[in-house]
Amino acid sequence: MPFFSAGFTLIEAVVAIAILMFTIIGPITLAQRSLSASYYAKDQVIAYYLAEESVEYLRNLRDGNRLKGNPWLQGANPCFSSGGSSYCGIDPSNFMGSVIVACSSVNSNCRLTYHPGNSVYGYAYDGSGTILSGWQSSLFSRRVSIMRPDGALPTGAENEVVINVEVSWQTESLSPQTFKLTENIFDW
């Protein structure tokens, strides 16, 4: 009478488990990478809009100054820089009463805060560097400088300046990222 095995051998079971693991791990890894890429893309879009917001504010400041008969760069002096050596922060949300803020020792890298109720970014710090109630720390820092096309410090008498905006952030475990936007604006 021949002897027949009624079950799997240990080797067959190990091979079956290995095949099952590969078929499960592949899609899970793909889903995880897709999710990480979508978070990174979201942060890139936010960084672009934060940079563009500063440029649009400065264009609006220029236009408003000209319509009022004021010098076209009036009010932008805290952002004046020589070779990009000094920076300011621009907070169009204006929750703190000052739209152009100095990147001071309290907030030297111009770290933005986020207000989840209003879905806006701003610089909501008190004098000691504590984030105000209702605001939370964000991933993003935004620094703005204004200089002449030759890199020199603006005097306010020129007809063209260069706006440099740098938005920095760090997504999850990736290395720090930076988005830079440079825009020339002219006196009209």
Image (cartoon, rainbow, N blue to C red):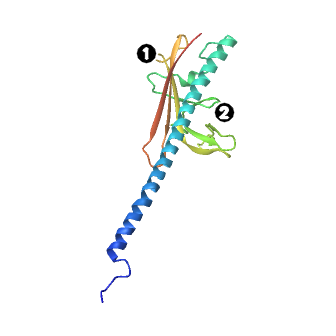
Observer-nearest residue: 93 or 34? 34
Q: Which quadrant of the rendered structure holds the N terminus?
A: bottom left
Q: Which mark is residue 106?
A: none
Residue in the picture at 66% in, 40% down = 119
Q: Residue 102 at what x, y percent from top left? A: 56, 31
Q: Earlier in the sequence, mark 2 or mark 1?
A: 2
**Looking at the picture, does residue 1 appear above or below residue 178?**
below
In the picture of the structure, the residue carrying the numbered disc 1 is 150
Observer-nearest residue: 45 or 125? 45
Residue in the picture at 66% in, 33% down = 93
Q: Residue furthest front?
A: 1
Q: Residue 35 at what x, y percent from top left? A: 50, 48
Kindly identify the amino acid type of the residue bearing the numbered disc 1: Asp
Kindly identify the amino acid type of the residue bearing the numbered disc 2: Ser
Q: CA distance from mark 2 to mark 1?
A: 32 Å
**Looking at the picture, does residue 79 appear above or below residue 30?**
above
| Label 2 SS | loop
**Looking at the picture, does residue 182 appear above or below residue 10?**
above
Left or right placement of residue 136 versus residue 15 in this view? right
Observer-nearest residue: 76 or 177? 177
Left or right placement of residue 45 versus residue 116 in this view? left
Q: Residue 184 at what x, y percent from top left? A: 51, 18
Res 110 visible:
no
Res 134 visible:
yes
**Looking at the picture, does residue 133 appear above or below residue 166?**
below
Left or right placement of residue 58 versus residue 168 in this view? right
In the picture of the structure, the residue carrying the numbered disc 2 is 93
